[in-house]
Image (cartoon, rainbow, N blue to C red):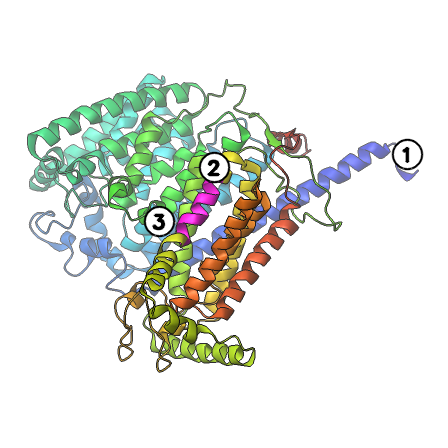
């Protein structure tokens, strides 16, 4: 009635209240993201400044340190440590004394401000139209990704200047007015990184010809100035680069993620390598620049800039790790007509740019060519192959909706706790699954290694003390059968060989096989089973961290026989090389048994025939026998493994709701609807 008396309508008041609530939530999310960005920035600065002086800003030290190349009277390149252009040396040399006085704090915080400026410019340059939510959240997300990226982390750690050319190009394309000023900034960037000259054709063919001419004139003028001031250094630099010689490190170093570096790593040298590099580089330049011009004309100038930068990465004679920011900018391109495929490309780019290459692919010789050139391959595909959508595509704004299974009623009212994690019926993108599985397993390995393990004497003593506690509990419960089983199996050669083989072979083969079959045949159940396995593994990592435990084979004086790894020398702190490679005290809970129990339960629940269910349940039984017989686990370790697996299934149920069948009737929900609703929210 009050609303009516004041001329309003109840519906309008309700809509205004809902809009206000949505706006408040968006503000809270934005504040949280800015807080995350600030924490990441503080952390990066703290890591740099807490590093010992001789180990931080090492590249900057080679320039301005007491023995730095900017102090030498001869050529800057005599020491082979200076890799910048002559113009860069000409500009920085007068600043040497000031840089030395504020080497740590000034340079680090200055670089940090450049990163923030880069993130703000990139966020404002997103292709239009974007939702109000995206516009508000883009800046903190972009800055956070930059802080996490390997190029920025390397730049902060080494004291490099590679952020400056990228920022100058973005300022020239998006921030300044006037084509001449734009070309001036890009020309200065090209004087610092010559491959930035590739932006001149982009400017020319997109109608900004004055900017292209200004870029060329500025580059020529600054290079000529440096040549006049330092003719010997200029000759050395340009001849070395034209000949493909890596200034600083060897050109075939893994850090050189350019086409030239990859060809050298493949064993090609001499005229054949140079000819192949020039031909392939020219082809990449033509294809990449044509794509960049097309995207610029389509209104996606930031994507065009990123594609051109990726071309520069590929065709440069040397492209070091701190010069690879262009690949990160390429995630603004939209790939995939389906909503479920929309996140594959950005997630792949983020993983490539934030994680070491060894975490992306297994350490197998056949995969080394991919692992050693993973960033180059990302730049190459972004420049020449990734089918970025045009803004005229009907799926650019509204992708094909995702199909969800109809909700299944749960026993408890508040289940699922996260309703937006609805059950998707069809299989997820295979590339994304492989990436996430590999990265997840690498993280598992790293956490497992760091969880109070290694050769630390205190950790060894704690783990042995916990081993005595477990043995005492088992004796109280009459479960201490490990010694008897171990010695019984050792005396039967074929049984010992069988359990050794089972322990070392089936731990990974069976879970991967189950996941593979589910992915192909039962995609909805695959997501359910994969989530339960992931939760169980995360909980197990907490157990490794909180309760380091020595397995029976590493308990001195108890007489256990290590049937798999051989006799242990307990007089040595590391018990041989194995304990130096991985945490041997990550025994509680046993993931050997936990993963096997997960396999058995999944097969027993989903297999269509009784004999398949029985065969699946035999796997955890054989596994618990193997881990006890080989003295690698206590019986209670298996109980711990069963506990985390049960908790994994329980968490999956609580968060996502009951399991549904792939044969359920799908419901279509578009992920674009929430954004469209946000667009209708009053400002």
Q: Which percent across, then down, holds residue 254?
A: 22, 45
Q: Which percent across, then down, holds residue 296?
A: 40, 22
Find the distance from the CA under tag 3 to the CA under tag 1.
Answer: 63 Å
Residue at left 51%, top 25%?
337
Instruction: Verify CB contact (< 8 Å) between mark 2 and mark 1.
Output: no
- Is residue 515 a member of the stretch shown in magenta? yes
Q: Which mark is residue 4?
A: 1
Image quadrant in which you'd find residue 201: top left
Q: Residues within 10 Å of mark 1 (few under 14, many from 20)?
A: few
Residue that numbered label 2 is attached to: 123
Disc nearer the start of the sequence (2/1): 1
What type of secondary structure mainly makes up the magenta span? Answer: helix
Find the distance from the CA under tag 2 to the CA under tag 1.
Answer: 43 Å
- Is residue 535 a member of the stretch shown in magenta? no
Residue that numbered label 3 is attached to: 359
Q: Identify which residue, 443 or 149, lies in the foreground.
A: 443
Disc nearer the start of the sequence (3/2): 2
Q: Which percent across, then down, holds residue 410?
A: 72, 46
């Amino acid at each position: 009635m009050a609303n009516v008396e004041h001329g309003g309508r109840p519906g309008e008041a309700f809509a205004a209240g809902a809009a206000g609530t949505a706006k408040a939530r968006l503000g809270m999310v934005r504040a949280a993201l800015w807080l995350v960005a600030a924490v990441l920035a503080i952390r990066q600065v703290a890591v740099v400044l807490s590093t010992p002086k001789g180990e931080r800003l090492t590249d900057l030290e080679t320039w301005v340190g007491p023995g730095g190349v900017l102090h030498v009277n001869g050529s800057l390149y005599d020491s082979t440590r200076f890799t910048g252009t002559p113009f860069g040396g000409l500009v920085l040399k007068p600043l040497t004394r000031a840089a030395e006085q504020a080497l740590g704090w000034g340079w680090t915080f200055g670089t940090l401000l450049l990163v923030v400026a880069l993130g703000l410019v990139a966020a404002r340059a997103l292709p239009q139209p974007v939702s109000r939510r995206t516009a508000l959240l883009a800046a903190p997300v972009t800055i956070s990704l930059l802080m996490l990226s390997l190029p920025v982390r390397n730049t902060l750690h080494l004291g490099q200047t590679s952020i400056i050319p990228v920022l100058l190009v973005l300022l020239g394309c998006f921030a300044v007015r006037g084509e001449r000023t734009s070309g001036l900034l890009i020309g200065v960037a090209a004087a610092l990184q010559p491959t930035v000259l590739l932006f001149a054709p982009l400017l020319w063919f997109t109608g900004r010809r004055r900017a292209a001419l200004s870029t060329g004139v500025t580059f020529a003028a600054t290079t000529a100035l440096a040549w006049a001031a330092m003719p010997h250094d200029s000759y050395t630099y340009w001849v070395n680069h034209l000949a493909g010689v890596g200034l600083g490190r060897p050109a075939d170093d893994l850090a050189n993620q350019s086409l030239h570096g990859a060809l050298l790593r493949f064993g090609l040298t001499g005229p054949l390598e140079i000819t192949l590099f020039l031909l392939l580089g020219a082809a990449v330049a033509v294809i990449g620049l044509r794509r960049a011009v097309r995207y610029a004309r389509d209104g996606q100038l930031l994507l065009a800039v990123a594609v051109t930068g990726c071309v520069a990465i590929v065709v440069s004679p040397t492209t070091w790790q701190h010069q690879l920011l262009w690949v990160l900018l390429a995630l603004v391109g939209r790939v995939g007509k389906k909503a479920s495929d929309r996140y594959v490309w950005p997630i792949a780019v983020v993983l490539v740019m934030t994680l070491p290459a060894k975490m992306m692919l297994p350490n197998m010789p056949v995969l080394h060519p991919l692992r050693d050139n993973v960033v180059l391959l990302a730049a190459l595909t972004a420049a020449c192959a990734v089918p970025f959508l045009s803004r005229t595509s009907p799926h650019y704004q509204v992708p094909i909706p995702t199909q969800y299974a109809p909700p299944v009623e749960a026993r408890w009212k508040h289940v699922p706790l996260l309703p937006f994690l609805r059950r998707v019926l069809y299989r997820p993108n295979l590339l994304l699954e492989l990436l996430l599985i590999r990265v997840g397993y690498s993280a598992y390995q790293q956490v497992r290694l760091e969880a109070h393990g290694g050769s630390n004497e205190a950790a060894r003593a704690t783990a042995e003390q916990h081993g005595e506690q477990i043995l005492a509990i088992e004796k109280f419960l009459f479960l201490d059968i490990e010694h008897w089983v171990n010695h019984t199996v050792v005396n039967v050669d074929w049984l010992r060989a069988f359990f050794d083989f089972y322990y070392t072979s089936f731990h990974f083969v069976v879970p991967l096989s189950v996941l593979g079959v589910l992915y192909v045949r039962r995609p909805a159940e695959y997501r359910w089973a994969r989530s339960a396995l992931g939760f169980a593994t995360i909980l197990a990592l907490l157990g490794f961290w909180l309760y380091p435990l020595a397995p029976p084979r590493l308990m001195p004086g108890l007489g256990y026989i290590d049937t798999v790894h051989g006799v242990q020398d307990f007089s040595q702190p590391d018990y041989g090389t194995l304990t130096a490679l991985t945490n041997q005290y990550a025994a509680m809970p046993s993931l050997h048994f936990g993963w096997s129990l997960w396999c058995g339960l999944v097969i027993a629940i989903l297999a269509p025939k009784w004999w398949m269910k029985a065969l699946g349940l035999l796997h955890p039984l054989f596994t618990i026998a193997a881990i006890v017989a080989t003295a690698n686990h206590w019986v209670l370790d298996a109980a711990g493994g069963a506990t985390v697996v049960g908790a994994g299934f329980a968490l999956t149920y609580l968060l996502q709701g009951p399991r549904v069948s792939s044969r359920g009737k799908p419901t279509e929900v578009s992920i674009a609807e929430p954004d469209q609703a946000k667009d209708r929210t009053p400002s």
